[in-house]
Amino acid sequence: MDVINLRSDTQTLPTPEMMEAVAAAQLGDDTYDEDPTVRALEEEAARLLGKEAAVLCISGNMANLACLMAHAAPGDEVFLDPESHIYYYEVGGLANIAGLMPMPVPCPSGRMDPGDLRRAVRRPNLHYPVPKLLCLENTHNRAGGTVTPLDLHNALCDTAHDLGLTVHLDGARIFNAAIAAGVPASAFAEKADSVMFCLSKGLSCPLGSIAVGSREVIERVDRARKRLGGGMRQAGIIAACGLVALRTMVDRLADDHANARLLADGLTAVPGLRVDLATVETNMVYVDHRDAYPDTGAVLARMKAVGVLASGRPPHHIRFVTHRHYGPDDIREAVERVRTALRADG
């Protein structure tokens, strides 16, 4: 039985064209800014996002952290959703490495309200950290891959700037957001002071993420990257895949969105499973399993036994993420396997 692996779009493998590009890549020492393939990728990424400059990092975690360190100093205050990836999944790096003070601003459905942000920023006081930075996330992972609409995103950026804050956008899946919103990715980047996006998710690269911003900001990000151990040598082998991804893999993300909708529609018909279809905007499907089995681990184990892999979001949810390795027929097969796995008789 072939396994249908829908744990994450990080499970994607590089395309044959990417592997050919690696073999043919011109290489140099990136720490000396002498890798021509890295320079080409950074220039193309900056142009695509409408920014002056870009820097290649090993991971989204590193790129996010380097951007935070570029915008704020130890002790400064950072406003962000407590369900955001930076707050929830990045090992507390904003605090234990960057020395920043998080100020959580609850965001129903992953969408911050500008009024809540304004109320969260306190007037200067000797006892308070200095407010410096707003972090946004689009698409929003823990909200189910939902998209913050462009008008709301711009309103948040405007509010932050009016309050004297800079804005960092965790755009790990920014191209998914752009396709779902029907706008270029540069529209979401325009008012943000820095943006991170991943090459290693739906774009299918083996590793790598990119931070973009003004030349001044990216110079500071580059220095922070070095402090984090992110100085690289012949990094063109990473960048070669990234160039192929930006040129060939962005538009096809719409297929992943269509397959996520197909999956969500199928899973809603499985007894004991619930999906909030309004949240299925991109390539993620969050499934509430409490009516089938109360234990997330038990649900995942039953699905694994029939060759379907997903990731757990305890106590009551599992997450499926569609990607290029599985088409509509695979998705229908996954639904039927899940139905078999969760039958009352086992």
Image (spheres, grey):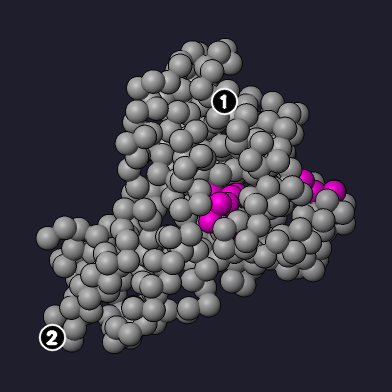
Compared with residue 134, is residue 222 higher up or lower down, i.e. above or below? Answer: above
Do the numbered discs 2 and 1 sit on residues whose CB atoms are within 8 Å? no
Mark 2 element type: loop
Residue at horizontal 26%, vertical 64%?
A: 330
Q: Earlier in the sequence, mark 2 or mark 1?
A: 1
**Crowd rating for badge 1 (residues with CA inside 10 Å; few <14, some 14–19, many 20+):** some
Q: Nearer the viewer, residue 259 or 107?
A: 259
Residue at horizontal 71%, vertical 37%?
A: 51
Q: Nearer the viewer, residue 345 or 332?
A: 332
Give the quadrant of residue 108: bottom right
What is the x, y in percent for residue 335?
27, 74
**Crowd rating for badge 2 (residues with CA inside 10 Å; few <14, some 14–19, many 20+):** few
Q: On the rendered structure, is 74 left or right of 161?
A: left
Compared with residue 31, is residue 251 higher up or lower down, i.e. above or below? Answer: below
| Amino acid residing under circle 1 | Ala
Q: Is residue 86 magenta?
A: no
In the rendered image, the quadrant that contains the N terminus is bottom left
**Mark closer to the observer (2, 1):** 1
In the picture of the structure, the residue carrying the numbered disc 1 is: 40
Question: Does residue 131 show up?
Answer: no
Residue at horizontal 35%, vertical 22%?
A: 23
Question: Does residue 254 show up?
Answer: yes
What is the x, y in percent for residue 127?
81, 51
Q: Nearer the viewer, residue 43 or 84?
A: 43
Mark 1 element type: helix
Residue 325: assigned label: none
| Amino acid residing under circle 2 | Asp
Residues shaded magenta: 163-177
Give the quadrant of residue 79: bottom right
What is the x, y in percent for residue 49?
66, 42
Compared with residue 317, is residue 70 higher up or lower down, i.e. above or below? Answer: above
In the picture of the structure, the residue carrying the numbered disc 2 is: 345
